[in-house]
Image: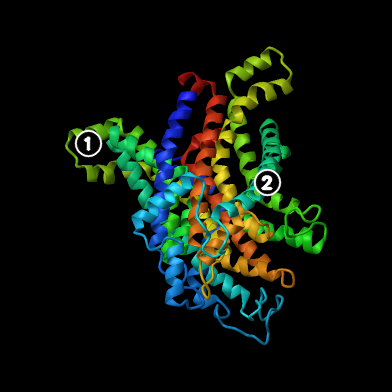
Amino acid sequence: MSKNSTLWSDAIYRLSRNKAAMFGAFILLILIVCAVLAPWIAPYSYSFQNLELGASPPSTDHILGTDVLGRDLLSRILYGARISLLVGFVATGVALIIGVSWGIVAGYSGGRVDSIMMRIVDILYGLPFIIFIILLMVIFGRNLWLLFGAIGAVEWLTMARIVRGQVITLKNQEFVMAAKAMGVSNLSMFRKHLFPNILGPIAVYATLTIPQVMLLEGFLSFLGLGIQPPMSSWGTLIKDGVESMEEYSWLLIYPGITFTITLFALNFFGDGLRDALDPKTTDN
Amino acid sequence: MLNIFIKRLFLAIPVLLAVASITFFLIKLAPGGPFDADKAVSPQVLKNLNEAYNLDASEWEQYVDYMSGVLRGDFGPSFRFPGRSVSEMIATGLPVTFELAFYAILIALLIGISSGVLAALKRNTYLDFIPMAIAMIGICVPTFLMGPLLVLIFGINLEMLPVSGWGQLPGDKILPSITLGFAYAAYIARLSRGGMLEVLNQDFIRTARSKGLKERNIVIKHAMQGGLIPVVSFLGPAIAGLLAGSFVVETIFQIPGLGRFYVEAAFNRDYTMILGTTIFFSAMIVFFNLLSDLAAMWLNPRSRDIS
């Protein structure tokens, strides 16, 4: 390795040698491109119905077949990718913002503030959050942005713990003390000294949170409490597939495969990123 | 130990009280009353209904009334099923859900621990790779996909097992239990593999080996006690996950358990049922978390000494 290798260039080097992680990244890239370009590359509109055709097995016109209303399954999977991935990224973003700020404030303040803030996290950990999401969806209606917020508000707890731990280690290091002695303000301390140094664990945990969030969305949509028609996510497609799987098994199988492959890719990539950024874990 | 238990138990009380209060007032925020449903009801009937369910009283009075009921184990009447109380519905659904969760966790522990320990002992061989690959599948295939796929394969195509009901046909408990347990088997396999690997490298294991103890004794008596602590601490949170899983599994297999009641209540906007089950679920989960933390503490000699 070159002499002036940084943590990140080291990590990228290690990551690029991890086949499973690179494969995951490749799949993810394709999926994201497909999701973004869905309106242009999808052969049909996601809501275009062909009632005469009805449910048809995969054919040359409809590569993955059609559903009971004659809608092209491939197009619906492509459009579903938009929603599923959007939920994954946005809700993870919400979780990141809450978790990171909570963790930094708790870890940096220390003392009573820290113990109160972390006690709150401990308490929230022990509560059945899935039930509260369902509760919110029932009370305030099944709104997409509420869903993002609610899922994000659940997933930040682990992030807060990880960040706090990191900040506490950093706080006692010389460069932070030096910055403090020079009178650096709290805000620029977070921005310039603490945040860049905890970016690694944050990136790792964020990649591993996305599949969790997508699972949660799929779970809610499967129960009929998530995304509402005519919009569809992979969760709702699987739900529709289950309803007609006895006669039209392709309606369950293809969305199922897509969803599973995506989760695999995210998990492989996340694991790879963790190993790359934290060489200790690869040793044992 | 006892001290910690009592301390945590006392901490749990205000937490549960807060959960119950927040849920109560959230439900009050919900748009629409419970009786403005499909059929228009005459004002007189509405007035009588409101009186019967104590909806005329101030919210504070309703709150106090409800909370004192909860303390006596009375969660009030169901709004959607007149004549049935929420406590009654919990009492009918709970044993079914418990049984399902019990089989699922049994499957998860048996498969998960045995394959995880084996994988750790035979590290970097096929006995390690294959179970861990299957575990990855278990983590990536969600319950709501696993269930229908099992139904499709074993129920519809092979016609081996019944695909719905609970305790009506022979073998109808098999598929739901496997569906619910599979993902946890996967997590437990990974956790016990990791925990065992860590312990197997430690000095006391080397000492045991150099004393010439049998490998089987080393694994079972020395390594597993420490190596399985992560599994024990995982069991508390797993109960919460099992509960969420039971919503899906009971819906797929049409099992009359508490999970399905809850999902139906969410659809029907049966507010008292939602309120009651939420409080009940929270209490259960707080309790199981407490138990698993204590068990993990008890297994770990270091934390035992501190207390």
Q: Which residue is mark 1?
A: A179
- The answer to whether the residues at label 1 and label 2 have Cβ atoms under 8 Å apart is no
Q: Residue furthest left?
A: A183
Residue found at x 40% / y 40%: B14
A7 left or right, relative to A56: left
Label 2: chain letter:
B
> Which quarter of the rendering shows the C terminus of chain A?
top right
Q: Chain of mark 1?
A: A
In the image, taking residue A136 as reference, residue B100 lies left or right, namely: right
- Give x and y (percent) for residue B57: 36, 60
Q: Is A179 or B167 nearer to us in this picture?
A: B167
Q: Is residue B304 in view?
A: yes
User: Residue tagged by mark 2?
Assistant: B99
Query: Circle 2: is it few (<14), some (14-19), or many (20+) Cα within 10 Å?
Result: some
The amino acid beneath tag 1 is Ala
Q: Position of residue A253 (x, y in %)?
A: 68, 65
